[in-house]
Image (cartoon, rainbow, N blue to C red):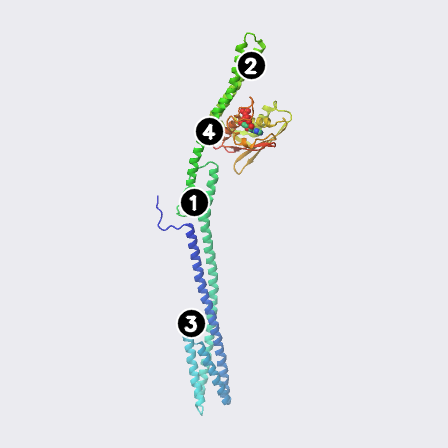
Amino acid sequence: MTGKPRIALNIRQKVVLSFAIYALVVICIGYYSYTNLERIGQKLVFLEKLNELSSAALEMRRYEKNYLLYRSPEAIEEMAAYMNLMEEIIREISPFAKTLRVGKLLEKLQADFMDYKAEAMHIDTASTLSEETLEGLRIQGKKLIYSIETAVAEQRSKLFSIIRFLKTQLLVVLGVAVFIGVFIANMIAVKVIRPLKEIEKATLSIAEGNMEQLPLPKTYDETRSVIEAFNTMLRELDMRQDELIQAKKLSSLGILTSGVAHQLNNPLNNISTTAQIILMDLDEMPKESLRSMIANIETEVRRAQDIVKGLLEFSRAKHFSIAPTDLKSLIDKTIRLIASDLPPQIEISVDVPKDLIIPMDAQRMEQVLLNMITNSVQAMETARGKIEIIAVTDPENDKAVIKIRDTGKGIPKEYIGRIFDPFFTTKGGSSGTGLGLSIAYGIIKKHRGSIEVASEVGKGTEFTIRLPLINKEAS
Ligand SMILES: Nc1ncnc2c1ncn2[C@@H]1O[C@H](COP(=O)(O)OP(=O)(O)OP(=O)(O)O)[C@@H](O)[C@H]1O
Ligand SMILES: [Mg+2]
């Protein structure tokens, strides 16, 4: 046996851990996406400023051209005003050098601007202008415009690439989230639902009398504790059942003994009384009376023999010969057996499929049916009523279900729990031994079947017999 590993998480811890990791991943990705969005916002502001710078530069250059053409001092003033504006914009965007990592770009812009400004100062201060100075200004102007436009194009393309990246990231995150979600759901299903299914299966098999222990899982979590607890419960149940059977056996023995004593006492008393009368009046007794008294003794002896025979049947585990038997033919045969004793106002209807073959001991089952139909007949107080025998198959459980229903007087609630006890009878005098249903119960159990009763006083009784359609062991 392997010991409990040092780090063994139970299901609750595993689920909490998975969700914590899930939450952490979502927070990290969320934070990363947020910073990227923030960067996009800053880039947009930066780009807007660069555009302003570009327009100011173009305006400045327009006045530069005007000056070169007309030499008007107003043009110089306008140029200076735009240069100031550009200077101000450059100052405004200088903090972006760090945050957007555009230090080099800004440095270059500033350098080109300063170069241009220096050239422009020459014009302002020089009284006569050489062709060379003018050319220098033009070249610097072009250079400045070019570097501003390159910066704008570069920043715009960077902005688009960030947006593209964010789009891909969003898709990947969604995919990962779905994957982790499916993984957690699957883990819960495997860890929780499967053991529950196992337990459900085990519970069903316990209902059928199987007390086998469930195999323990390899993990050390709640599933294991539940299965361990379940196995303990099974052991307890098994023990209690044994105790219960023992107690039941003892109580049946008590009922049996007092039943035998009581049942045998009646015929013995009758025999004794009759024999005493014969002994006393033997000489004067007419032959006819003597014959009737001896016949009486004979009847009582037969009754005692019947009781002993029933008892033997009840107690002896005689060999059962289980073979596929056609239920409908068996029922018809049983009804024919008692047809002559049946009061004419009692109607028996049989609704059983023609080809319903059940593995059973035909003779024993005939005995069961005979007793049950007789019970139903005897339950009709007015000797009028209806008995229905119905059979269906229950393919889900591989069982045949036989119902015997009558419109008799019903069984009072206080007797219902005792009708299967040996010697329990409500039929006074010499009409019942009270062994019929207990023998029937034993026979049905031998077939691995079950018998249940439902009854309502004044309305009738319904017995339900369930027999397996597949013969697992012919005992
Ligand atoms: N269909 C029924 N309707 C009403 N009561 C019933 C019915 N079947 C059985 N009982 C009750 O159950 C008791 C026990 O039945 P069981 O067949 O074991 O013995 P019994 O019929 O009294 O005697 P025996 O079968 O030996 O003639 C009956 O005495 C009767 O009170
Ligand atoms: Mg009976």
- The amino acid on which the numbered mark 2 sits, given as a three-letter code, is Ala
Residue 19 lies, in percent from the top left, at 44, 55
Name the disc covering residue 226, or none: 1
Q: Quarter of the picture for ligand 1?
A: top right
Residue 250 lies, in percent from the top left, at 45, 28
- Numbered marks: total: 4
Specify which label sits upstream in the sequence, 4 or 3: 3
**Is disc 3 surrounded by few (<14), some (14 to 19) or many (20+) residues within 10 Å?**
few
Name the disc covering residue 295, or none: 2
Residue at image mark 3: 99
Residue 34 lies, in percent from the top left, at 46, 66
Q: Is mark 1 within 8 Å of ligand 1?
A: no
Image quadrant holding the N terminus, namely top left
C-alpha gap between disc 3 and disc 2? 126 Å
Task: Tell me if residue 437 comes above or below residue 115 in the rendering.
Answer: above
C-alpha gap between disc 1 and disc 4? 36 Å
Q: Helix, strand or loop at disc 2?
A: helix
Task: Tell me if residue 159 comes above or below residue 228 in the rendering.
Answer: below
